[in-house]
Image: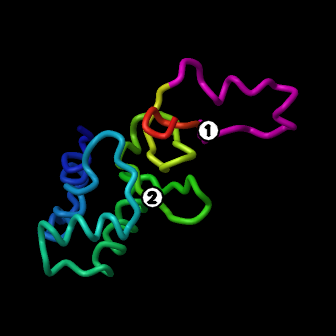
Amino acid sequence: MSDLLERLRGRGWRMTSQRRVVAEVLDGDHVHLTADEVHALAVGRLPEISRATVYNTLGEMVSLGEVTELSTDGRAKRYDPNAHRPHQHLVCSGCGVIRDVHPAGDPLTDLPPDQRYGFTVSAAAITYRGLCPECS
């Protein structure tokens, strides 16, 4: 389980019922939901929550650096609560399921100096693609 709720409380983020529900929906490992998926799950817990509130809350969490925004298909933005745990993503090319992975090595140091072209590399995002057992 991720520690998203505790991190947000630790920052003094005002925890309204709507914000709490959005954070609870996102909390956990291997969670990579779209805003619409977050909204659908949040409505199940708090029927009056609006789509705009979900979008605004997600935006605030990203601005705080407590949730990472990613896109694995070039279209839908997904929200990852594991913003403070270095990891990469494994994506099924069939069904689109996403898993957090922790490969050995550091992608920042794995890039050879002659391939940096003078850049000071500060971040790397690697996405592994393949077929999950259900799609194989």
Relative depth, front residue between 32 and 4: 32
Residue 41 at what x, y percent from top left?
23, 64
For the residue labelled by badge 2, is the local secondary structure a helix, a strand or a loop? Answer: strand
Amino acid on which the number 1 mark rests in the picture: Ile
Mark 2 Cα-neighbour bin, 10 Å: few <14, some 14–19, many ≥20: many
The spot of residue 136 in percent (x, y) is 52, 35
Tell me where residue 19 appears, x and y as whole percent.
Answer: 21, 66
Q: Which residue is mark 2?
A: 78
The overriding secondary structure of the stretch rendered in magenta is: loop
Residue where numbered disc 1 is placed: 126
Considering depth in this image, is 75 or 22 the residue closer to the camera?
Answer: 75
Circle 1 sits in a helix, a strand or a loop, which is it? Answer: loop
Residue 9, compared with residue 89, is above or below; it is below
Query: Which quadrant, please, contains the N terminus?
Result: top left
108 to 91, vertically: above or below: above
For the residues marked 2 and 1, what is the alpha-carbon distance in whole angstroms? 15 Å
Question: Residue 23, percent across and down?
Answer: 23, 57
Q: Residue at x 22, y 61 (%)?
A: 13
Q: Residue at x 57, y 45 (%)?
A: 93
Work out whether residue 32 or residue 122 is closer to the camera in this orientation and state it: 32
Residue 42 drawn in magenta: no
Give the amino acid type for the residue marked by disc 2 in the picture. Answer: Arg
91, above or below 35, in the image: above
Residue 111 painted magenta: yes
Specify the segment rendered in magenta: 103-128
Residue at 35 percent across and 60 percent down: it is 61
Residue 77 in the figure: left or right of residue 51: right
Q: Nearer the viewer, residue 35 or 107?
A: 35
